[in-house]
Each structure stands twice: as structure tokens, then as C-alpha cells.
Amino acid sequence: MPVDPALVSSSASELIDRHGAAAVARAQGLVERATRAGYVPALDLALLVLSEVERRLQAAGSDTIR
């Protein structure tokens, strides 16, 4: 099932709004949890959100992305 780009965008926005540069670590935690759960649709979404968070923070000039 395809992931809705609007969901990825809104999820990334929410993480960044709530956690700033720490949103990367939060998104990585979502990826880890989805991986452990073995639920592929959740993992797909989590990876896309992580990529979007990293992209946005890099574009904003955040130097805390690891």
C-alpha cells in the first residue's frame, strides 16, 4: 500500500515543531520500533518520515544532523 505524501509531510512537520533538531533521533526511534515490530507498512512510513525530517533540517542549515 502506498504511503500518502501528505502524511509523511505532516508527520515530519510535527516532529520538527515539537523536537527541533532532536526530531532526527525521534524519527530514528520510530524506525527502530517499526523494525522490531516487523510491520512493513509502519516501517515504510517511518523511513520516509526520517528522510523527510533529515532533508528539511539539512535544508534549514541544522548542523546537528547525524
Image (cartoon, rainbow, N blue to C red):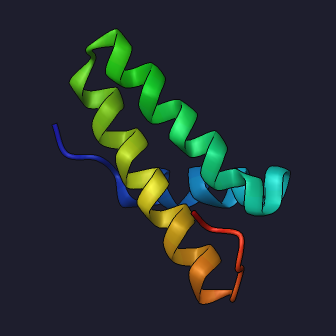
Nearer to me, 32 or 1 = 32
**Total labels drawn:** 0
Q: Quadrant of residue 21?
A: bottom right
The quadrant in which the N terminus is found is top left
Residue 37's x, y, as percent? 35, 11
Q: Work out whether residue 64 or residue 24 is closer to the camera in this orientation and state it.
A: 64
Q: Residue at x 69, y 88 (%)?
A: 61
58 sits left or right of 37 in the view: right
Position of 8 with respect to 39 (left or right) is right
Left or right, 32 with reference to 66: left
**Residue lying at 56% horizontally and 44% vertically, measured from the top left:** 27
Q: Residue at x 47, y 20 (%)?
A: 33
Q: Is residue 2 above or below residue 52?
A: above
Q: Residue furthest front?
A: 66
Q: Is residue 36 left or right of residue 26?
A: left
Residue 66 occupies quadrant: bottom right
Residue placed farthest to the left in the image?
1
Instruction: State which quadrant residue 46 falls in.
Output: top left
The residue at the point 52 percent across, 41 percent down is 28
Residue 9: image x %, image y %? Answer: 52, 61
**Extreme residue in the top direction:** 37
Residue 12 pos. (x, y %): 59, 57
Q: Residue 58 in the image: x percent, y percent?
A: 58, 81
